Amino acid sequence: MRLVEPFLEMIGGMKTTLMMMFEKPVTVQYPEEKRQVSKRYRGRHELKRYDNGLEKCIGCALCAAACPADAIFVESSENTDEKRFSPGERYASTYEINMLRCIYCGFCEDACPTEAVVLGDNYELTFTDRRDAIYTKDMLIVPVPQGGAPTPQVTEPGLFNRSVPEMNDPQD
């Protein structure tokens, strides 16, 4: 009985190998064809904007506090009516993510009160040197939406007085 069991296991393994030889290989021609990722995939970070072009990030640094890998650095500055980046009192003057330290857990996305930080679906992250792995605010922020103005903007005094703008009810 001791000699029969290993022999049967070996036959089972050979059967699996032979069956795989006749299946069509799953090959993706990578640079030309890109695989679809699931909706829950967490890839490269993005900093979002409002429709009017103002940045959603208010420089609160809750994302940096929630990051278990200490990969995010946020430095905030005050908004003025002549130089307005976000609708709140502050904005992130410096926003950096060290992609070599990031573990793509999504805690930064969950901690953000304005939904400014989003983990997108981009999985093409390559670096030739450690300095290239530090993504700055300019690399992370999405382009200005059509109809919006680039930041900084000039606004009338007292127009924005809340850190987190009121959200519209989706049922309206």
Image (cartoon, helix red, strand yellow):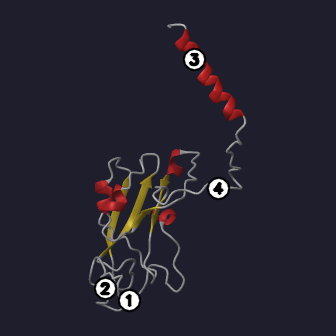
The residue under the point 57% across, 17% down is 8
The amino acid at mark 3 is: Leu
In contact (CB < 8 Å): disc 1 and disc 2: yes
The residue that disc 4 covers is: 34
Q: CA distance from mark 2 to mark 4?
A: 42 Å
The amino acid at mark 4 is: Lys
Label 4 environment density (alpha carbons within 10 Å; few <14, some 14–19, many ≥20)? few
In contact (CB < 8 Å): disc 3 and disc 1: no
Q: Nearer the viewer, residue 27 or 148?
A: 27
User: The C terminus appears in which quarter of the rendering?
Assistant: bottom left
Q: Nearer the viewer, mark 2 or mark 3?
A: 3
Dot placed on the residue nearer the N-terminal end, 3 or 4: 3
Residue 51 sits in which quadrant?
A: bottom left
Which residue of the protein is positioned furthest toward the front in this rendering?
Answer: 1
Residue 147 coordinates in the image, percent (x, y): 52, 86
Residue 15 coordinates in the image, percent (x, y): 64, 26
The residue that disc 3 covers is: 8
The residue that disc 1 covers is: 155
